Amino acid sequence: MRRENVTELLKNYRSYKYAINRYDRHKPGAAAGVASYDAMPSGSGASEYFFDLNARMADMGTTNNADYKDYLEYKRVVQDIEGGLDELTDEEQSVVRLKWMEDMSLRDIAKRKQYSVETVKRNHKRALEKLGICYRFIKVPQIEPVTLRGSEHYHHQENPNNRLTLL
């Protein structure tokens, strides 16, 4: 994989992970539409108690099949990124995380770790080379925002060239 694709994956890792967590937190539960209140105490507050325990917030609006496909794509990419990072030495992994996931400069990383800038650059270069090999068969998601009814959703569709395009 080319260096710029490796760095794009690393730069977007936190966003991918956040999107996965939001989808997981808000996806509809299997029992949400078929709730049985038979075991619930009757009277005021029973339904509120049930929804306090089981309901999910509705701020995502409705999700559809394209949302689910995006979720699966992000989840796969996050697992691939984490798997590649696990193949690095502790020093290489630390430099990559600080540089690409915490948005620090190599100079700031060198100060923080009390290393020379050259040592940090060497670790960074070696890490990106290893990740290029690890990520050889990963496709970088090409997902752009599409505004639908007041909220942003991201969708993609496979095309014959194995590139992701917008619906």
Image (tube, rainbow, N blue to C red):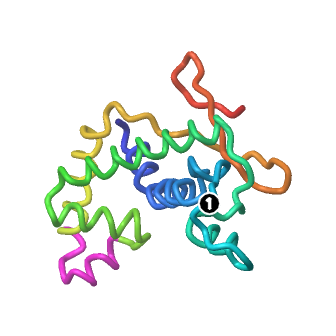
Q: Position of residue 120 (x, y in %)?
A: 23, 68
Nearer to us in this view, 14 or 8 = 14
Residue 55 covered by magenta stretch: no
Label 1 amino acid?
A: Asp
Q: Quadrant of the N terminus?
A: top left
> What's the residue at 53%, 44% (across, down)?
71
Q: From the viewer's perspective, is 68 left or right of 8?
A: right
Q: Which residue is mark 1?
A: 38
Quadrant of the image occupied by residue 159: top right
Residue 116 covered by magenta stretch: yes
Magenta-colored span: 106-118
Q: Position of residue 100 (x, y in %)?
A: 39, 62
Question: What secondary structure is the stretch in magenta mostly built from?
Answer: helix
Q: From the viewer's perspective, is 141 left or right of 96?
A: right
Quadrant of the image occupied by residue 104: bottom left
> What's the residue at 72%, 77% (across, down)?
43
Few, some or many residues within 10 Å of mark 1 (<14, 14–19, 20+): few
Quadrant of the image occupied by residue 35: bottom right
- Give above or below for 30 relative to 162: below
- Give above or below for 8 relative to 122: above
Q: Position of residue 76 (x, y in %)?
A: 41, 41
> What's the residue at 69%, 34% (across, down)?
166
Secondary structure under tag 1 reads loop
Q: From the viewer's perspective, is 109 left or right of 113?
A: right
Nearer to us in this view, 98 or 109 = 98
Q: From the viewer's perspective, is 107 left or right of 143?
A: left
